[in-house]
Amino acid sequence: MKKWWYWLFPIAWMGVIFYSSSTPYEEQDLKPFLGQYVDLSFLIPYVEHISFVYHKSEVSVEALGINGFAEFFIRKGAHVGVFFVLMLLFFVAYRQTTAFSFAKASYFSLLWTVLYGVVDELHQGMTPNRTPYYGDVIIDSVGAFIGWVVIFIIARRKKLRKLN
């Protein structure tokens, strides 16, 4: 029965994600921190030409300032990282607690991670000053997919080492 403890890790991590999605944007705003402790002005010449629309809002240095521009990428990078970790935690839990093959464990891990990304966005829609957006589900899925690829790369390397 001790092996079921492995499931506490992805469940706890989903709790962290749930808590973060329950927090209004104003309480997660990084711009004041960046403005006070980090001078990003040196980046302006390198990124001032970048401009695109994400969730009906322009993302550019002109529209957001350098701190808001950097915050956008920090926040989206956090989506990738958080769901990358969730994918790995699901995979370890499956491998340690089931007789699933490597492939089946990885596919189920990917599936549950992506589905949790959908649930997370729906939950975010119930949080003040937060909106669900399918683009964030795609970014979450990218993080999960990167985790999936990493798992296969590690497995391949282990297999090659055994052959040598």
Image (cartoon, rainbow, N blue to C red):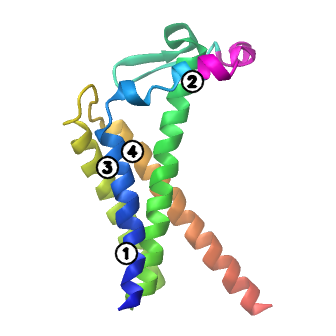
Say whether disc 3 or disc 2 marks the residue closer to the N-terminus: 3
Q: Are marks 2 and 1 in contact (CB under 8 Å)?
A: no
Amino acid type for the residue under numbered disc 1: Trp
Q: Are marks 4 and 1 in contact (CB under 8 Å)?
A: no
How far across and down, in percent of the image, does residue 53 sit?
Answer: 43, 20
Describe residue 113's horizontal placement relative to residue 143 as left or right. Answer: left
Foreground pick, 57 / 37: 37
How far across and down, in percent of the image, does residue 55 sit?
Answer: 35, 25
Q: Over which residues does the magenta segment extend?
A: 34-47
**Badge nearest the viewer, 3 or 4:** 3
**Badge nearest the viewer, 3 or 2:** 2
Asked where in the image residue 67 lies, by quadrant, the reply is top right
For mark 2, what is the residue?
A: 33
Q: Secondary structure at mark 3?
A: helix
Amino acid type for the residue under numbered disc 4: Ile
How far across and down, in percent of the image, does residue 7 sit?
Answer: 37, 75
Residue depicted at 37% across the width and 60% down the height: 113
How far across and down, in percent of the image, does residue 126 sit?
Answer: 19, 36
Say whether disc 4 or disc 1 marks the residue closer to the N-terminus: 1
For mark 3, what is the residue?
A: 18
For mark 1, what is the residue?
A: 7
Local crowd size for mark 4, using a 10 Å CA cut-off: few (<14), some (14–19), many (≥20)? some
Q: Secondary structure at mark 4?
A: helix
Local crowd size for mark 3, using a 10 Å CA cut-off: few (<14), some (14–19), many (≥20)? some
Q: Secondary structure at mark 2?
A: helix
Q: Taking 81 as reference, is 1 above or below it?
A: below
Local crowd size for mark 1, using a 10 Å CA cut-off: few (<14), some (14–19), many (≥20)? some
Residue 37 lies in the magenta stretch: yes
Marks 2 and 1 sit apart, C-alpha to C-alpha, by: 35 Å
Residue depicted at 40% across the width and 89% down the height: 2
For mark 4, what is the residue?
A: 138
